[in-house]
Image: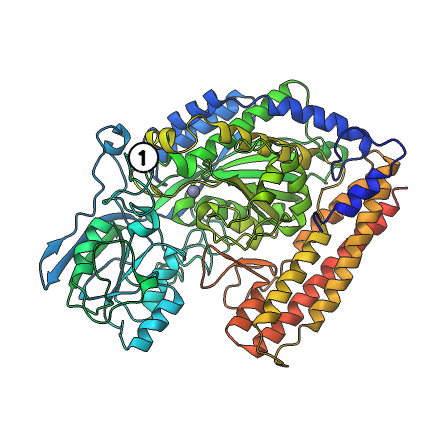
């Protein structure tokens, strides 16, 4: 089986007069050519030179959240969008945004050493020598001053701490040193804290993103000896966004928690360091030799400690509340006019804040969003108006913990519930393979979009390029790759960029699209225009292609007569995931009864099949837009929302989606069917059975909604 929507294509193919153009889900055949023609027009608009200029402007200076640089980028974006005739507003929020004031790391025994904690400028890259750079630090680690023996804990994953326990190496009262890679950094620090460490250092081992991989900047793309990866260590598995306003928007004068009450703030000091600063510390560790899988690429024999290396770590912050500027441009849809209260929103967002200059992260993606905005504005001047309202959003404060997007979703929750159809996200985009993450119900839709755009690397369609790729790739924003098959599947979304609040909190079907980008300068002072020109998409070929993908996706989603969702893909995906969970259960176990889910999955799959048949029958009839069709559309939009539960996931009620969540212990990587899966993984059988019943009920309601859509569609005859 290839695409889930194959039966639909086949039904189309038996037409008396087969149309000469490729079918478009959600459009009647008489609309296909018109839509394709408009898309061809759209594809010709994006320009490499403009993409280059946007980056030049946005990555010119450091622009971290809360800084004048960030405000300047927001102002530039708002002026540009307004200039193109788009209704643009800046929405301001307030969030806890700590800046480091003290950072000290020294070894006090057995030899003295003081860490540099600085990234030296590169002579040929003036951006690296600018003022107002935010020094390397981890946001939302605690202020603290500790001195203790050091212990090496590999990647700081749960199994690494387990292994040390078995070796008899106690972490209590020690300072943990872990390396970047494999898991989200926040979980490394959180697990160190839970295991009793009083401090945590996170270093970049050259094996992951330094000289072991390739030449280092400026000779090559990888991280130099003094390069440091900044980043948030907020406990985002509980909730993202402003730590002081979980579940509500943080605006001037709104209610706030105290820092002591905020559950996402760590209680131990954490500091990211370069390998040049880590090496002298690792050289002074003795104790057990660590296994080969724990060893990096440094010229040292890796030992676990504890000690004799003893380090003094002191960090302090200015814990101020600072402003966030979300820039939102709107293209109002005609749909709102025709169907009064039935306006629907299609939203595309990318963050604009960076850790330093952020040419790759986030400006490469933000430039594509800006060029997509211009593309749509050109079409609009030629007379096009979308049926649904399109919103283009540049988020602030993503790096600190998805602040701008989360506060925005929390502020507009009710309206989003009534109107939002789809959220599309992008972030860093380079010239690696194309990566499509998203909700299963959008799988056939995005496959059709990728079918119609050419991959710059292979000159095949992007769809074929994605399907042909057999080896796993590094996902954008640090996601963990899933095993790949010949057929096309979107990767499930975990965390790591601004789709989280839309998908996991508001229940809006989401996509995360882009070309994979190298991570050698990720979150460092070396992520500059000069680096991007030399080692990433210098000629903007891939950025142009991504602009085409985004423009076409928005045109289709905004103009389709019926939203192009496919719930057969959802039921097929859930079936796959349930099988994965079944395999994790102890053999011949009667502990967890998954049958209630299977029963409802059969119903959902049957309902989706019927809907597909009705959709293809409707398509043949070619009925134009009507009040009745608008009702079908509304029902389809609502189906995704049925996947939410009001009381959320166990122990983290901000996460309300029953199908997708970032893992409690993985961070970036998704846990599909999180309630059931995480209970099974923790061998909590009562909770697992409870979650099975809850998920079965969720699927029952979803199936009923799809059945309703079919009935409504039938009535359009
Ligand atoms: Zn980013």
Identify which residue is drawn at 42% across, 23% down: 53
For the residue carrying disc 1, how many other residues have a C-alpha within 10 Å: few (<14), some (14-19), or many (20+)? many
Residue lying at the far top of the rendered structure: 382
Residue furthest to the left: 111
Q: Nearer the viewer, residue 311 or 573?
A: 573
Corner quadrant of residue 580: bottom right
Can you identify the residue that label 1 sits on?
62
Q: Taking 702 as reference, is 107 left or right? A: left
Find residue 694 and report its image quarter: bottom right
User: Residue 183 vs residue 329: left or right?
Assistant: left
Mark 1 C-beta to ligand 1 under 8 Å:
no
Q: Report the side of 371 relative to 703 (left or right).
A: left
**On screen, residue 470 above or below 296:** above
Is any part of residue 206 visible from this angle?
yes
Quadrant housing residue 458 = top right
Q: Residue 70: x percent and y percent?
A: 37, 35
As rendered, which of 129 and 238 lies closer to the eye? 129
Is 684 drawn above or below residue 13 in the view shown?
below
Query: Is residue 642 at all visible to an observer of this figure?
Result: no
- Where ligand 1 lies, by quadrant? top left
Indicate the secondary structure of the residue bearing disc 1.
loop
Residue shown at 72% from the left, 40% from the top: 341
Task: Name the residue nearer the viewer: 338 or 625.
Answer: 625
Q: Nearer the viewer, residue 411 or 535?
A: 535
Residue at image position (75%, 25%) is 34
């Amino acid at each position: 089986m290839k695409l889930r929507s194959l039966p639909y294509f086949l039904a189309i193919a038996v037409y008396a007069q087969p149309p000469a153009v490729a079918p478009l889900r959600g459009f009647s055949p008489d609309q296909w050519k018109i839509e394709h023609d408009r898309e061809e027009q759209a594809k010709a608009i994006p320009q490499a030179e403009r993409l280059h200029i946007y980056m030049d402007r946005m990555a010119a200076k450091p622009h971290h959240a809360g800084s004048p640089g960030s405000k300047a980028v927001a102002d530039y974006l708002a002026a540009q969008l307004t200039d193109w005739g788009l209704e643009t507003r800046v929405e301001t929020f307030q969030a806890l945004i700590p800046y480091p004031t003290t950072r000290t790391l020294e070894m006090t025994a057995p030899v003295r050493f003081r860490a540099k904690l600085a990234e030296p400028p590169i002579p040929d890259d003036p951006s690296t020598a600018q003022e107002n750079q935010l020094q390397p630090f981890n946001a939302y680690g605690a202020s603290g001053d500790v001195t203790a023996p050091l212990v090496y804990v590999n990647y700081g994953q749960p199994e690494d701490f387990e292994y040390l326990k078995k070796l008899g190496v106690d972490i209590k009262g020690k300072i943990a040193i872990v390396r970047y890679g494999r898991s989200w950094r926040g979980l490394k620090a959180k697990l160190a804290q839970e295991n009793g460490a009083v401090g945590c250092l996170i270093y970049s081992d050259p094996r992951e993103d330094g000289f072991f991989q390739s030449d280092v900047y400026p000779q090559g793309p990888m991280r130099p000896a003094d390069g440091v990866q900044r980043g948030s260590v907020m406990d985002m598995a509980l909730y993202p966004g402003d730590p002081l306003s979980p579940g509500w928007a943080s605006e001037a004068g709104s209610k706030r928690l105290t820092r002591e009450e905020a559950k996402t703030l760590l209680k131990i000091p954490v500091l990211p360091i370069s390998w040049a600063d880590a090496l002298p510390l690792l050289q002074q560790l003795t104790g057990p030799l660590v296994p080969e899988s724990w060893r990096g690429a440094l010229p040292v024999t890796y030992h676990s400690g504890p000690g004799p290396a003893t380090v003094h770590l002191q960090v302090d912050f200015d814990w101020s509340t600072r402003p966030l500027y979300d820039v939102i441009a709107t293209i109002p849809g005609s749909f709102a006019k025709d169907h009064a209260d039935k306006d629907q929103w299609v939203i595309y967002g990318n963050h604009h804040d960076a850790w330093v200059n952020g040419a790759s992260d986030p400006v490469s993606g933000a430039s594509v969003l800006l060029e997509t905005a211009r593309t749509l504005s050109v079409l609009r001047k030629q007379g096009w108006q979308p049926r649904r309202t399109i919103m283009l959003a540049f988020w602030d404060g993503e790096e600190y913990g998805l602040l701008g997007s989360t506060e925005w979703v929390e502020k507009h929750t009710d309206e989003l519930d009534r109107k939002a159809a789809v959220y599309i996200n992008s972030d860093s985009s380079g010239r690696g393979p194309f990566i499509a993450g998203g909700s299963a119900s959008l799988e056939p839709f995005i496959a059709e979009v990728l079918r119609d755009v050419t991959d710059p690397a292979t000159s095949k369609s992007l769809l074929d390029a994605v399907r042909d790729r057999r080896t796993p790739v590094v996902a954008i924003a640090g996601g963990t790759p899933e095993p790949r098959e010949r057929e096309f599947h979107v990767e499930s979304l975990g965390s790591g960029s601004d789709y989280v609040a839309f998908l996991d909190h508001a229940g809006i079907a989401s996509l995360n699209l882009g070309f994979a980008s190298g991570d050698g300068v990720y979150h460092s002072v070396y992520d500059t225009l000069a680096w991007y020109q030399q080692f990433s998409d210098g000629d903007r070929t891939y950025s142009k292609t991504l602009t085409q993908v985004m423009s076409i996706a928005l045109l289709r989603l905004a103009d389709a007569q019926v939203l192009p969702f496919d719930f057969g893909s959802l039921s097929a995906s859930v079936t796959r995931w349930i099988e994965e969970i079944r395999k994790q259960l102890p053999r011949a176990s009667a502990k967890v009864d998954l049958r209630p889910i299977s029963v409802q999955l059969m119903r959902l799959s049957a309902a989706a099949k019927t809907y597909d048949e009705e959709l293809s029958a409707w398509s043949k009839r070619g009925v134009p837009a009507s009040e009745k069709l608008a009702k079908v559309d509304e029902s389809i939009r609502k189906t995704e929302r049925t996947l939410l539960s009001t009381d959320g996931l166990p122990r983290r009620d901000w996460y309300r989606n029953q199908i997708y969540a970032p893992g409690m212990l993985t961070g970036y990587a998704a846990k599909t069917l999180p309630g059931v899966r995480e209970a099974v993984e923790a061998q909590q059988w009562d909770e697992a059975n409870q979650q099975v019943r809850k998920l079965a009920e969720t699927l029952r309601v979803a199936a009923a909604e799809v059945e309703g859509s079919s009935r409504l569609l039938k009535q359009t005859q």
